[in-house]
Amino acid sequence: MSGVKIHTKEDAFRLFDEAVTALIHSKFIVTQKPITDLLRCLVFNDQLHAFLADCKKGVDYEAELTSAVQETETGYAFVLPKGNKRVIALVTGMLRDFDMGTRSMSSFLHDFYPADKDNHEKYALFCENVLEPYRDAFRQSFLYDIDEPARGSEEERAKIGDAVIEGSAPMFAALRTVFLGDNKLSAKKREDLIYLTDGLYYALEKGDIRIIKTIWTALKLLLADYKKAARKFSDITEFLALYALI
């Protein structure tokens, strides 16, 4: 872990992020140390420790673990619960079990991932399906106090602060600039792309999840082969995904 001094929540999150990223990038056979390192940072950093304690309030770990095991046509699947804090409580508990030896990661991988894959491939699926959502849930809940995913009926409105929305404006402006500066675009296509970009930001201001997803999907399709806008559109996509809007 880095030697950065921990003063802010962002500093604390970077400590966690560094540890969980090290675990995700580990090989299956050498996961013991990165698991221990991750758990230590959650214990010894006061902000992370207090946050984890809050996530565990009212959560029955064994009940969550049982509920996460779901029967399918081909066997059993491990499905994370809804709500970031429940995900954090469950996955942290599992990592603690792996660390203490009360639960076997090899057995877990054997039970929930395809038999035709070796442990390294199964571990990669575990990272994709469990550890990466765990990291995302931690970021959303610890830094932005987002717990439940902002999904539901078409009438649901996202609850995103005005300051956050205003802070995203430069990303939309940057995308607009790409379109305005590209002389190879026809006037009609440039107009359409700018209209959709402005419409996406307007939908974000209104918090209309259905319209946000619709306009974002339209932009994604239109920009599929448009490399000049790839980075700018990716920034917007990451922002919307962070707040569970797409």
Image (tube, rainbow, N blue to C red):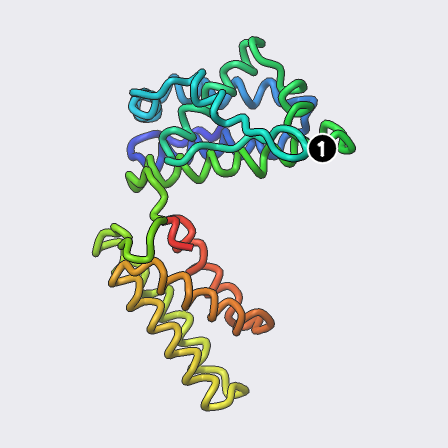
Label 1 amino acid?
Pro
Q: Could you tell me which residue is drawn at 65 percent across and 35 percent down?
A: 73
Q: Could you tell me which residue is drawn at 30 percent across and 20 percent down?
A: 58
Q: Could you tell me which residue is drawn at 42 percent across and 51 percent down?
A: 241
Q: How many marks?
A: 1
Left or right of residue 36, residue 48 in this image: left
Left or right of residue 36, residue 27 in this image: right
Q: Residue furthest bottom?
A: 187
Q: Position of residue 237 (x, y in %)?
A: 45, 58
- Position of residue 53 relative to residue 126, above or below, is above
Residue marked by disc 1: 114
Q: Residues within 10 Å of mark 1 (few under 14, many from 20)?
A: some
Q: Position of residue 114 (x, y in %)?
A: 71, 32
Q: Position of residue 56 (x, y in %)?
A: 34, 21
Quadrant placement of the C terminus: bottom left
Q: Quadrant of residue 123?
A: top right
Left or right of residue 77, residue 93 in this image: left
In the image shown, does 72 or 205 lie closer to the viewer?
72
Q: Could you tell me which residue is drawn at 46 percent across and 36 percent down?
A: 135
